[in-house]
Image (cartoon, helix red, strand yellow):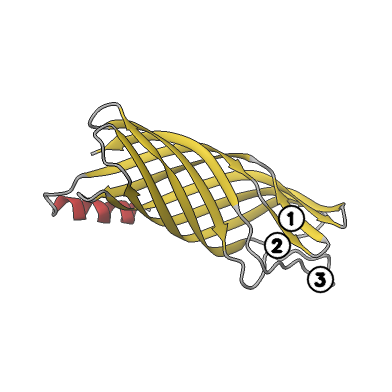
Amino acid sequence: MKKIIFFLLIIMAFNTKAQSFEIAPSYAYHFGGKINYGSEQIKFTDSDNYGISANYILPNGVGIGFEYIRQSTTFTHDYRGQKIGTGDVNNDWYQLVGTKNIIAKEHIVPYAGLGVGAANFSPSNVTGISYSSELKFAFTLQGGVKLFLSDHIGIKLHAHMYVPIQWGGFGFTAGSGGSGAGFSAGSSFIQGDIGGGIIFRL
């Protein structure tokens, strides 16, 4: 993350027409989501998340940057309505993001964006079944509005949609003992959040 921010700062330094560079810590309510596969289901509990984004905004309103989001929550694993596994889980999202200011007014700036990167799901304190971490290719969609109180300080209101791509399966490689049985879902699931943050514009 430090290398990406440093790279963006160098670009800005050599571009005298740069509009701005924005750093925004954020906090949001994160909807958990669930994965269904046959008679089994893994469900993440709704919780909060926190994150930070760094964006280089070009003169035409296009932004290029990096975003990190962490959701710390719990999950349950059910089989035919019976709970067979539970635990804590940290969901970390690492995204290269492109945004576009829809209306570039001085103090009110609606925007939309797309992110591409990875999501890492790390379970801990589990009971019932053993689970291992899962790293997945993922993308995000986002939109919101930036409200600038001055030239350098603003408030960002946003909503995200998070989509990890399953392809070969999901479920933290769940298994019971040495049987080799596992939980594997071939379809994607969707999470989302609603929140906001403070913008520091350079």
Q: Nearer the viewer, residue 24 or 181?
A: 24
What is the CA distance from the residue labelled 2 to the residue labelled 3?
12 Å
Q: Which residue is mark 2?
A: 171
Q: Nearer the viewer, residue 59 or 86?
A: 59
Q: Which residue is mark 3?
A: 181
Residue 105 relative to residue 186: left or right = left
Q: Are marks 1 and 3 in contact (CB under 8 Å)?
A: no
Q: Quadrant of the C terminus?
A: top left
Instruction: Classify 60 as above or below 152.
Output: below
Instruction: Classify 149 as above or below 119.
Output: above
Instruction: Classify 72 as above or below 171.
Output: above
Label ID, residue 42: 1
Of the residues under marks 2 and 1, which one precedes in the sequence? 1
What is the CA distance from the residue labelled 1 to the residue labelled 3?
16 Å
**Residue located 49% across and 55% down the image:** 140
**Residue located 77% across and 57% down the image:** 41
Q: Nearer the viewer, residue 52 or 31?
A: 31
State the count of labels: 3
Locate residue 117, reporting x and y percent: 46, 61
Q: Quadrant of residue 145?
A: top left
Of the residues under marks 1 and 3, which one precedes in the sequence? 1
Q: Are marks 2 and 1 in contact (CB under 8 Å)?
A: yes
Q: Amino acid at mark 3?
A: Ala
- Which residue is farthest left? 16
